[in-house]
């Protein structure tokens, strides 16, 4: 700051290594004459980062009986004595280790003796008595008189501060805040800017940028006749800085701007110089000494997540930092604040449930315990919050109607988490401290409170908390700084960012987030709408191939129409369509009434329907007949889907300028032969559709690498694949042998106990799953140099995992639409 020509009191710096030598017993070097006049100094610690803490500054060093008398001649007896008694207190506590409360008591005793309520009435006589009492107390406790030689005072203060920094308790404290255990602190010795004395003197704190909007707004306070942190202590009411803020707050005491307009001008000039010279925005501690402004400290300006984005963009717009630097300064997670409503950070929070922060944003609504109730409540114009033990595909429609979701079980890749993220709904999963009695419709929380359907709650999916009642919100904002960060990121990044989008609606949303394509369309989600699920169930219930084909024939036009719409929305951008993946049992109803409805619709006895459902039940469905295993054992399903894809392709190609090249993806592969068999059937269907239409089309076929065996055999798979896409949800599940739907029950305990550094379903396990990814990428590329590599598990929206993909040379990541902006920024950062 001094080098920039900012108004900083003269001083010198004791470097960190010297300070640590002093802490271990080295002598304090001879510092020569006191630098500057008056000969009163301060020492403050200066670690690499201000939030690591450090010993409290010691002010007014150099005051003694004689110096106080000299000072009295210039600033008056009372102010000089007040400074002296402050110094005795700060030296007594900071250097001699006395209890600050004892000094406070002396002070209040003196006030009482003088019959006063406030400091303002203390005159020189009272203060002189207080100085004597403080010195006597010091001498009694320490066993020697209060030191009168300024050099002795200074040496003792330096040693005390060096030792305080090295104390084990201080070390532990700063390590908890992320400091290196060996991190040191410099000490800054400076001439005191007194802040107490004649004319307009005092101290304050000021920030000239708004913490939330990044706009030029001056906030802060100023306390006349004060030093150090006084303005923040609340002993007396401080003045505000600008007239505008005083008027806004309805304060009658004049603002600093009105008391000393020049001081505000000087602070503004200093702020500009610091912004340009130190290339960031700051909050300043300042002192006014007889009208002259001195800066004592500059800390990075306070800023919210949104404020951080606005400040970085503003600095880049002003040419103070480069766009690349701005991009690197923004935590991608900060963008969440731009995309979803959030609870106002200052709002009161009555938390009744805590779980995993599965999908960000916050929403207030009324609780419901079933998908049907959610739909009914939505129909009444209310905002339902769906509370379930966990969700299943049956709940999808209820989730569409809901404004937020809370589940008692489940992990970061459980059904509720994945679907909510896709829909952009705030969601908390695995809130194991809530109890649900669905029959009675009661939610009981840890402290015994009970809620019935209709109770108003707020779900904070950003923090993973459920709150009582309605909380104050901040609304999303997609223009301005956010839009610039997105543009700059796109200019910089080389990694593609696609969206996981299952329906035309999702596709539209993805386009709004400027994706490079769709990296995963989970076709099963197209089957859950009311008119379709019936046909789907009939297909599943079919006794033989002919019956199954008849149901599939009815599904085919529906699928084709969906694909047509999706392709049209994506206007030639790549679209990866995954063939049917989940175990068929997931599509069947669970309740008795629904079974009955299904039996009626199919004109079958209920017993036959329930019997068939029972046959389909598996002990371990995630490892059972799903993915490509369905495609191999019931080939007509994938045939129907591929036909729908190809017909939709031709239909869109007839209308649009940009031809569609669909990318068909086979899920849950573990053997090369599976790919070979499916490929030959799909190729045959493609031939058939082209021959029927008399038109040509192109398509790509790829494999989803979701099993460890597929990763190991990636070389084989790549031989007949245009692309490999890593399904890291299943791959993580299978690599760890850890159920993605149940991990949430103990994941927090595991992470808290340090067993796992992080939830591997949230951030890619680079060491284990990551090794499989690298190995597969290398084997695949060695076999097929044109192989395109993507990742479409939930990790595709996680910045650390995105960095991994960049370093591994992948072509794209794919994630839920609402995480696309985070991925675009993280991909740019990974490039830099
Ligand atoms: C995966 O397993 O990573 C994946 C994307 O597929 P799903 O989540 O649908 O199983
Ligand atoms: Mg999967």
Image (cartoon, helix red, strand yellow):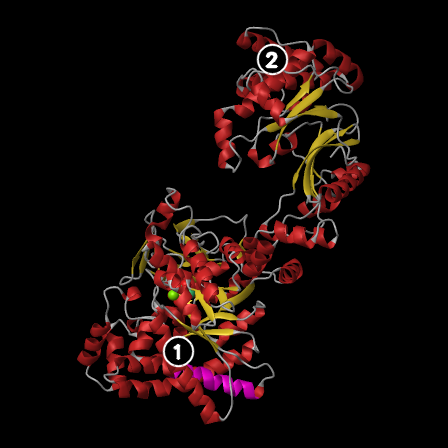
Q: Secondary structure at mark 2?
A: helix
The picture quadrant for ligand 2 comes to bottom left
Name the residue tied to disc 1: 679
| CA neighbours of label 2 inside 10 A, class few (<14), some (14 to 19), many (20+) | many
Is 393 displayed left or right of 345 in the figure? left
Count the marks: how many? 2
Q: Residue furthest front?
A: 782
Write down the quadrant of residue 824 in the picture: bottom right
Q: From mark 1 to mark 2, how far is it between C-alphas? A: 90 Å
Decide which of tag 1 and tag 2 comes sooner along the chain.
Answer: 2
Q: Is residue 818 above or below residue 171?
A: below
Q: Position of residue 476 (x, y in %)?
A: 58, 60
- Determine crowd level at label 1: few under 14, some 14-19, many 20+ residues with C-alpha closer than 10 A: some
**Can you say which quadrant of the picture contains the N terminus?**
top right
Residue 360, how many percent across, how many down?
49, 57
Q: Residue 800 in the image: state x and y as whole percent.
A: 50, 53
In the structure shown, which secondary structural element does the residue marked by tag 1 occupy?
A: helix
Using the image, determine if residue 800 lies above or below residue 225: below
Residue indicated by mark 2: 134
User: Closest to the observer: 748 or 789?
Assistant: 789
Residue 731 visible somewhere in the drawing? yes
Q: Residue furthest top?
A: 144
Asked if residue 604 lies in the magenta stretch, the reply is no
Q: Which residues are magenta?
A: 640-654
The residue closer to the viewer here, 202 or 628, is: 628
Please report the residue visible at 28 percent of the width from the left and 72 percent of the height from the top.
585
What secondary structure characterizes most of the magenta part? helix
Viewed as shown, does residue 158 lie left or right of 546? right
**Percent position of residue 462, x then y:** 48, 54
């Amino acid at each position: 700051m001094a080098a920039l020509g900012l108004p900083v009191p003269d001083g010198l710096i004791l470097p960190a290594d010297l300070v640590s030598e002093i802490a271990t017993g080295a002598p304090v070097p001879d510092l020569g004459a006191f630098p500057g006049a008056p000969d009163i100094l301060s020492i403050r610690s200066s670690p690499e980062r201000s939030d690591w803490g450090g010993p409290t500054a010691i002010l007014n060093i150099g005051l003694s009986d004689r110096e106080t008398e000299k000072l009295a001649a210039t600033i008056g007896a009372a102010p000089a004595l007040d400074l002296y008694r402050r110094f005795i207190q700060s030296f007594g506590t900071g250097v001699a280790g006395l209890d600050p409360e004892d000094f406070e008591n002396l002070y209040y005793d003196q006030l009482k003796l003088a019959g006063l309520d406030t400091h303002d009435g203390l005159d020189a006589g009272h203060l002189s008595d207080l100085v004597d009492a403080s010195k006597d107390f010091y001498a009694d406790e320490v066993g020697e008189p209060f030191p009168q030689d300024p050099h002795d005072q200074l040496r003792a203060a330096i040693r005390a501060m060096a030792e305080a920094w090295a104390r084990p308790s201080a070390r532990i404290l700063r390590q908890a805040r992320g400091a290196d255990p060996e991190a040191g602190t410099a000490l800054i010795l400076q001439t005191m800017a007194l802040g107490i004395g004649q004319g307009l003197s005092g101290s304050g704190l000021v920030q000239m940028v708004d913490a939330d909007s990044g706009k030029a707004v001056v906030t802060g306070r100023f306390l006349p006749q004060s030093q150090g942190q006084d303005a923040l202590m609340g002993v007396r009411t401080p003045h505000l800085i600008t007239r505008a803020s005083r008027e806004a707050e309805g304060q009658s005491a004049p603002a600093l701007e009105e008391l000393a307009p020049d001081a505000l001008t000087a602070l503004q000039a200093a702020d500009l110089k610091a912004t340009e010279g130190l290339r960031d925005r700051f909050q300043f501690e300042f002192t006014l000494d007889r009208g002259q402004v001195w800066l004592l400290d500059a800390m990075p300006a306070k800023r919210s997540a949104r404020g951080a984005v606005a400040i970085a963009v503003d600095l880049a717009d002003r040419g103070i930092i480069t766009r690349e630097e701005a991009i690197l300064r923004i935590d991608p997670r900060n963008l969440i604040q731009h995309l979803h409503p959030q609870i106002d950070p200052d709002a009161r929070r009555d938390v009744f449930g805590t779980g995993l922060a599965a999908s960000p944003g916050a929403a207030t609504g009324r609780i419901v315990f079933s998908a049907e109730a959610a739909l009914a409540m939505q129909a009444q114009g209310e905002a339902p919050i769906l509370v379930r033990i966990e969700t299943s595909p049956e709940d999808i429609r209820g989730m569409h109607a809901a404004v937020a979701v809370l589940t008692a079980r489940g992990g970061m890749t459980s059904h509720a988490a994945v679907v909510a993220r896709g829909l952009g709904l705030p969601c908390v999963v695995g809130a194991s401290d809530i109890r649900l009695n669905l029959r009675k419709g009661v939610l009981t929380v840890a402290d015994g409170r009970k809620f019935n359907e209709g109770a108003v709650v707020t779900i904070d999916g950003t923090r993973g908390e459920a709150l009582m009642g309605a909380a104050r919100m901040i609304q999303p904002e997609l223009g301005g700084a956010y839009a610039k960060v997105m543009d700059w990121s796109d200019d910089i990044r080389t990694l593609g960012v696609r969206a996981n989008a299952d329906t035309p609606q999702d596709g539209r949303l993805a386009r709004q987030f400027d994706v490079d394509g769709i990296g995963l369309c989970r076709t099963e989600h197209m089957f859950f709408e009311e008119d379709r699920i019936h046909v789907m169930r009939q297909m599943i219930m079919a006794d033989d191939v002919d019956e199954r084909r008849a149901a599939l024939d009815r599904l085919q036009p529906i699928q084709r129409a969906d694909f047509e719409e999706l392709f049209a929305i994506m206007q030639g951008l790549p679209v990866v369509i995954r063939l049917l993946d989940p175990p068929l049992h997931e599509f069947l109803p669970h309740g008795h009434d629904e079974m009955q409805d299904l039996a009626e619709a199919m004109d079958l006895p209920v017993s036959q329907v329930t019997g068939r459902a029972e046959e389909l039940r598996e002990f371990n469905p995630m490892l059972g007949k799903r993915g490509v295993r369905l495609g191999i054992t019931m080939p007509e399903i994938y045939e129907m889907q591929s036909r729908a894809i190809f017909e939709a392709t031709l239909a869109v190609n007839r209308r649009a300028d940009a031809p569609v090249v669909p990318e068909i993806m086979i899920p849950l592969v573990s053997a090369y032969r599976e790919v070979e068999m499916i490929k030959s059937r799909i190729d045959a269907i493609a031939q058939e559709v082209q021959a029927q239409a008399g038109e040509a089309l192109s398509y790509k076929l790829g494999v989803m690498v979701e099993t460890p065996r597929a990763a190991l055999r990636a070389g084989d798979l790549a031989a007949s694949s245009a692309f490999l896409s890593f399904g890291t949800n299943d791959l993580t599940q299978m690599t760890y042998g850890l159920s993605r739907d149940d991990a949430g029950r103990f994941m927090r305990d595991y992470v808290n106990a340090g067993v796992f550094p992080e939830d591997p379903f949230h951030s890619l396990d680079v060491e284990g799953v990551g090794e499989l990814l690298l190995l597969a990428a290398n084997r695949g590329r060695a076999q097929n140099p044109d192989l395109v590599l993507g990742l479409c598990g939930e990790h595709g929206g996680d910045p650390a995992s995105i960095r991994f993909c960049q370093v591994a040379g992948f072509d794209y990541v794919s994630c839920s639409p609402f995480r696309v902006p985070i991925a675009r920024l993280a991909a740019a950062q990974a490039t830099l």
